[in-house]
Image: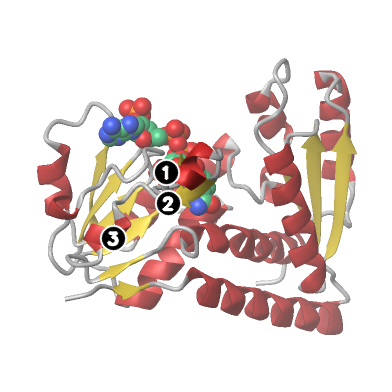
Amino acid sequence: MTADIIDGKLHAARVRADVAQAVAELRATHGLQPGLAVVLVGDDPASQVYVRSKGEHSLAAGMRSVTHRLSGDTTQGELLQLIAALNADPAVHGILVQLPLPLGLDQQAAIAAIHPDKDVDGLNVVNAGRLVAGMDALVPCTPLGCLLLLRETLGDLAGLRAVVVGRSLLVGKPIAQLLLQENCTVTMAHSRTRDLPAICREAEILVAAVGRPRMIQADWIKPGACVIDVGINRVPFDDPAKAAAGQTKLVGDVDYKSALAVAGAITPVPGGVGLMTVAMLLQNTVTAAKRQAGIA
Ligand code: NDP
């Protein structure tokens, strides 16, 4: 048996096309152009790549997109002042502060300062609370992307046994809540879980969000399970010459090659969940714009 490979590129392109259509309709029928403001502090190279991609995809979908680039010595007060101005700007429907912030800036305070209705990253405690309470929330983009891939792959998720490995606010906790809302029976595992392989083997849906390269082995996977690998880990190439030259590649939290022989379906890394994150950010911005304009 070889697992079906869940094509994140294909699904992300579909979401972006749906968003572009929704934006065109909103502009035509309500004169509403969803707007995303991204705040980047400092010059972290990875953050710059992510921010550029977010800006380009928002513009391609017909949205308004503004990136505020602040220098690395920006003070907390200056950052909060910018967030307050964006909260008050009616043309801005979504605000994203690119993380991590430079040392010395308080990340939690910055996220808390974003108006919950504009918090398109879904990291504000108000949105985390709304999600748990089953209310309309802005949900973090990566978990939302995982849910979409699972629904597209498995259809109705009700009654399925799901195991989520990892319990971060960004990924593990929200994906577990989303799966619970889908009527899965959910187990959350973490670094203190006993006999993790046995727990993983119970899963019909296995979500790995750990940050440890290839930790989840083939014999941890129930035959036929749907495996969603959120992990993005940079490791040296297997080829000793490339490794010696300092070249690296991306791998997930699942040992992909061996898992292919056991799982029913699996996301590759790269090419899986990672591509969904920006697509879901665009979707969240449209959702936020519609809610702010009172459009159902
Ligand atoms: P965190 O470091 O915040 O959380 C990691 C979680 O894994 C923690 O809950 C931790 O448990 C758990 N964990 C660590 N070691 C083990 C272990 N040996 N056994 C079981 N559980 C363990 O990471 P994130 O949630 O932010 O990210 C997870 C991965 O997903 C990373 O590789 C990250 O790069 C990737 N990622 C990918 C995104 C995408 O767009 N595809 C977006 C966001 C993240 P404990 O709580 O007990 O410490």
Q: Residue furthest top?
A: 104
Marks 3 and 2, the one that precedes in the sequence: 2
Name the amino acid, label 2. Answer: Val
The residue to which callout 2 is attached is: 230
The colour scheme of the drawn protein is: secondary structure
Q: Is residue 117 visible?
A: yes
**For disc 2, does the CB lie below 8 Å from ligand 1?**
yes
Q: Residue at x 81, y 50 (%)?
A: 37
In what element is the residue under mark 3?
helix
Name the amino acid, label 1. Answer: Pro
| CA separation in Å, label 3 and label 1 | 19 Å
In what element is the residue under mark 1?
helix
Tag 1 near tag 2, CB within 8 Å: no
Mark 2, residues whose alpha carbon is within 10 Å: few (<14), some, or many (≥20)?
many
The quarter of the picture showing ligand 1: top left
Q: Position of residue 261 (x, y in %)?
A: 19, 67
295 left or right of 74?
left
197 left or right of 235?
left
Mark 3, residues whose alpha carbon is within 10 Å: few (<14), some, or many (≥20)?
few
Q: Position of residue 104 (x, y in %)?
A: 72, 15
Tag 3 near tag 1, CB within 8 Å: no
Name the amino acid, label 3. Answer: Lys
The residue to which callout 1 is attached is: 240
The residue to which callout 3 is attached is: 257
Q: Residue at x 42, y 43 (%)?
A: 240
In the figure, residue 159 lies in which quadrant? bottom left
Q: Residue furthest front?
A: 241
Q: Is residue 97 visible?
A: no
Q: Nearer the viewer, mark 3 or mark 1?
A: 1
Marks 3 and 1, the one that precedes in the sequence: 1
Q: Residue at x 45, y 41 (%)?
A: 235
